[in-house]
Amino acid sequence: MKTKVLALDFGIKRTGLAISDEMKMIASGLKTVDSRHLMDELKIIIPSEAIDTLVVGEPKFTDGKPMQLERNILFLIEDVQKIFPDLSIVRMDERFTSKMAFQTMIDSGLKKKQRQNKGLVDEISATILLQNYLK
């Protein structure tokens, strides 16, 4: 069975999700979910999409120190590992992915109102994170 990779750009309010193709070459935005319901979503997505690797963004300040959000992410990873013990979890530096996502939105010609959609920024950030992992 061919498997895929799922990436998360975790935030307190929202989490952007991106998924790879079965060849693990192309990253595509999947959706943005309310972070309070993230585990429920993962319980559905991981088995139904045959996910074997979860890429989780590592939020850091520009000096490399971890942000406070890291604590929440570590709790999330712990919960995911309990439910999916065979799932490989990879951490990736997510510095500047939001800025890159916003620039991508500008470059693709999205109107200002569309660029203010924070959920879309999160989804694109997760896609950039996954694309960097797949390289």
Image (cartoon, rainbow, N blue to C red):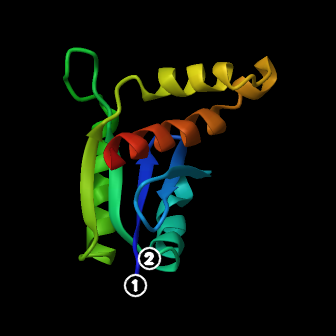
The reply to whether the C-beta atoms of the residues labelled 1 and 2 are less than 8 Å apart is yes
Q: Residue at x 29, y 58 (%)?
A: 77
Numbered disc in front, either 1 or 2:
1
Q: Under tag 1, what secondary structure?
A: loop
- The kind of residue tagged 1 is Met
Judge whether residue 34 can be spotted in this image: no
Quarter of the image containing the N terminus? bottom left
Residue identifier under label 1: 1
- Residue ID at (75%, 22%): 109
Residue 134 in sight from this viewpoint: yes
10 Å crowding of disc 2: few (<14), some (14-19), many (20+): some
Q: Is residue 20 left or right of residue 59?
A: right
Q: Quadrant of residue 106?
A: top right
Pointer 2 residue: 50
Residue for point 27% across, 15% down: 62
Relative to the observer, which residue lies in front, 53 or 66? Answer: 53
Q: Secondary structure at mark 2?
A: loop
Which of these two is toward me, 19 or 44? 19
Under mark 2, the amino acid is Ala
